[in-house]
Image (cartoon, rainbow, N blue to C red):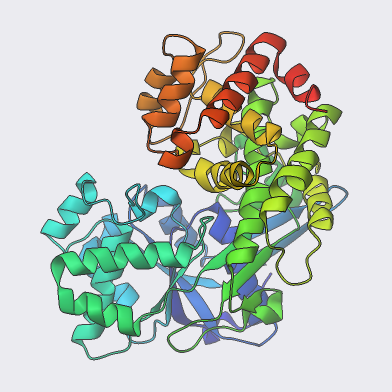
Amino acid sequence: MPDYDRSSLAVRMCHIGFGAFHRAHQAVYTDQLIGMGATNWAYREIELMGPTAPLNALKSRDYLYSVVENGADNRKARVIGSVIDHRHMADCGPEAIIEAISEDPIEIVSITVTEKGYTLASDGGLDVDNAMVKADLADSENPKTVIGVLTAGLACRRKAGKKPFTILSCDNLPSNGHMVKRAVLDFAAAIDADLATWIEAEARFPSTMVDRIVPAMTPESHSMLADVLGYEDPAGILCEPFRQWVIEDDFVSGRPDWDKAGATFTKDVLPFENMKLRMLNGSHSFLAYLGYLAGHETIADTMGDPVFKKAARDLMVLEQAPTLEAPGDVNLEDYADILIARYCNPSIRHRTWQIAMDGSQKLPQRALESIAHHLDHGTPFPRLAMLVAGWMLYVSGTDLNGQPIEVSDPMADKLKILANGDGVEAIISDLMQKTGIFPQKLADNAALKSSLIDAYEAIRQQGVKAAIAALG
């Protein structure tokens, strides 16, 4: 249990998106920092959609919830006390949400809303054709989207003659601070050019790199949690012991000293982001699509096969690391070995299906940017090609044994149609050319198309394991 006086805590931060990752990551760092006596800043959680019951139930438990770190050989449980308040759009409406994030004491509004929550178009700007964005632009004082709410909160600060709050993206996206900044500026410019000018001059949007494997909770993991704790905790989380947080040190005013709890402040997050996105997330996607197609339910199950274990490390070391500038004194081969050990943790049941979600939004930064590097340098990329081919087979909605796949992706319907075209060459061409996922330079590249056809055919004709083993 927290051994600090929670009555002394003050709401100085709001967080939008009270999901599993935030509970196991930013809230844990803050809880540890409070326990050290290094801050009294605490969170007000904000939800814009979804059911109201979970947060209301959490309130009845004084916002306390448990995190169990599941190591390969041991478990460590702690109760987190860094959350002390909440607001839900369905309970209070947009006006109260905007007030909750823009009141004077709030210094930071952080977000974990996944790629979809940013409502971005393929060019990286705000998707003004999105129905919810259109509705928010038409009634900007009663927004429902994350970007609309953030912009309205900043507008309130400007109107009151106050400094803006810092917007801290903690989603697993490259240059996440730049992405949310562009979306907010696009939204602001569409409703008030002067507001956009003020936000660009005064607000701050630091980028971050976040890392911790936090599998989605299942009835099995809730049961395991209850066994460890001795009681049921509906808001509790199971996660791995490892955690990492790299933060661009660019805030409007105050911030907690999260580095005292193990975070890293830096001037440039990009090398850390790219390292994680390509080596960790890229190999995770490789294991997710191909592991699922091979019949493996979890990453740990997949890593139990030496063929997959070797291929995952080779992908990282031979094909992803050469595309990277290693941050600081990081040794990329050592980093790969740490990742392999994390993947092999049998206590973490990270489902391949879960990692395979939203591939249309993840593939560019996890694989396509690296492929572009190899094409520019004339170097081979067989495992990256196998990853992309595995995704192409996965989004068809049918596995290699003819069993249906529940594809969770914002483009699922379109991808399924294209992935079930007339012949392999047509399928590969359509997925490259008609989805907007591949940059035009890659979509038109004959060498890439040939590599994907070869990998696709190898999987279909030889099976996943044999096709991967043949790579050496």
Q: At 18% across and 57% down in the image, what residue appears?
A: 136
Picture layout, residue 152 above or below residue 60 = below
Q: At 54% across and 60% down in the image, what residue appears?
A: 22
Picture layout, residue 188 above or below residue 375 = below
Picture layout, residue 62 above or below residue 165 = above
Tell me the quarter of the picture where residue 412 sits: top left
Q: In which quarter of the image is the N terminus?
A: bottom right
Tell me the quarter of the picture where residue 313 sits: top right
Front-lying residue, 471 or 392:
471
Image position, residue 34 (x, y; %)? 63, 81
Which residue is most to the right?
73
Disc tally is: 0
Image position, residue 451 (x, y; %)? 61, 26
Front-lying residue, 107 or 430:
430
Q: In this view, does 439 lie to the left or right of 297?
A: left
Instruction: Inspect this view and state whether residue 214 appears.
Output: no
Instruction: Inspect this view and state whether residue 313 appears.
Output: yes
Q: Is residue 111 left or right of residue 71?
A: left
Q: Is residue 302 left or right of residue 288?
A: right
Picture layout, residue 146 above or below residue 109 = above
Tell me the quarter of the picture where residue 472 sits: top right
Image position, residue 344 (x, y; %)? 81, 41
Image position, residue 342 (x, y; %)? 78, 48
